[in-house]
Image: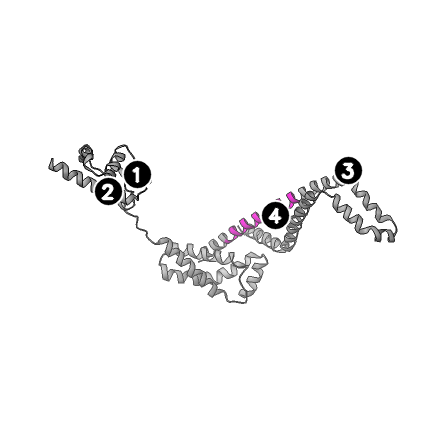
Amino acid sequence: MKKLEKKILKKVYFWEAKRTIFDLVLKMILFFSSGLFLFILGQIFFEILAEQKTLDLLNFFNEDFEVVKKYFLDNIFILFFEMPKFLLLLILIFLVIFSLVILTLIKNFYTLKNKIKSFLKLIKKV
Amino acid sequence: MSDKEAIVKIKRGEIDYFEVLVKKYSKVIYCYLFSKLKKKEDCEDLVQEIFLSFYKSISRFDEQKPVLPYLFEITKNVLKMFYRKRKVFLPLKGEIIKEEDDSQIFEESDVNLFDNLDRLNEKEKKIFEMLGKGYKIKEIGEILKTKENTIKSIIRRGRKKLKFLNSKL
C-alpha cells in the first residue's frame, strides 16, 4: 500500500510541477514581452509628441488657476487630438496585459511560494 | 488533521498535505476497485488516476463537503471509462465495407455481349457504349442525369437480355 501511495503522490507532484512551470514560464514571457513593448511604444509615443511640440501644451498648467480653469477643456481636447491614436491604443492594450500579469502574480504569490517549498521538501526527501 | 484543514492547505499551495488524503482514502478506493476488477495492476493504475483527477479538481472542491463520496463519484466515472476502453470491438468484415467496383459488373464471359448492342433499346445501348469507352457508372449517371442505381438496373437488365439473345443465336 505504501508503494501505491508513493506512486500516487509522485504522479500528483509531477503533474503539479509541470503545470506550475508552464504557468510561470507563460507569465514571465507575457510580463517581459508586454513590458518591453510598453517601453518601446512609450518611447516612440513621447518622441512623436515631442516632435509635434504637443507636450508644450502642458506648460499651461504653470499659469494662474483662473486661466487653467478657463482653458483646461480646450487644451485637453487639443492634446488628445494631436496624440497618435493607434499607438495610444496599442500602449493601452499592453498596459492592461502588463498589469493583469502583475496582479495575478501578486495574487498567487503565496500559493506559488508554498508550492515551491513543497517541491523542495520532496526533492530533499528523494 | 481533518480533511477540511488539509484541503484548505492544499488550495493554498501546500501540496504535501495531499499525502494526508491519500493515506486516508487510497486503501478504501483500492479495495473497492479490487472487488470489481480482481486485477492488482489495473486497480493500482485506476487508484492513481482517481487521485490525480481529484487533485486536478480540488480548487473547485467545497471543503465543507465530505471527501469520500466525491472520490467514489470519480471512481464510478473512471471505472465507466475503463470498461468502455476494454470493450471489444468486432472489426467489420472486408466484404461489407468493400466498395462496389464498376469493373466487376461484367464477367469475363460477357466479352461477346458487346457484339449485339443493336438489339438493345436506345438508352441501354448508349449506357453499354459508354461502359465500353471506360466511363464509370457514376459518370454515366451524371451525364444522363439518371440515378446510379437506375443505371445499374438498366445494365443488369441489358446484360440478361443480351445473354438470352446470344444463347438463342
Mark 2 = which residue? B154
Which residue is situated farthest in the left direction here?
B168
Q: Are marks 3 and 4 in contact (CB under 8 Å)?
A: no
Pair 3/4: label in front: 3
Pair 2/4: label in front: 2
Mark 3 = which residue? A51
Q: Report the magenta residues as a range.
A: A12-34
A81 relative position to B132: left or right = right
B130 relative position to B86: left or right = left
Q: Inspect the image, locate mark 2, and give the three-letter code of the amino acid beneath it.
A: Ile
Q: Main secondary structure of the magenta part?
A: helix
Pair 4/1: label in front: 1
Picture layout, residue B78 above or below residue B159: below
Q: Are marks 4 and 1 in contact (CB under 8 Å)?
A: no
Q: Inspect the image, locate mark 1, and give the three-letter code of the amino acid beneath it.
A: Ile
| Position of residue B127 measured from the top left corner of the image (x, y, whole percent) | 26, 37
Q: Is residue B40 visible?
A: no
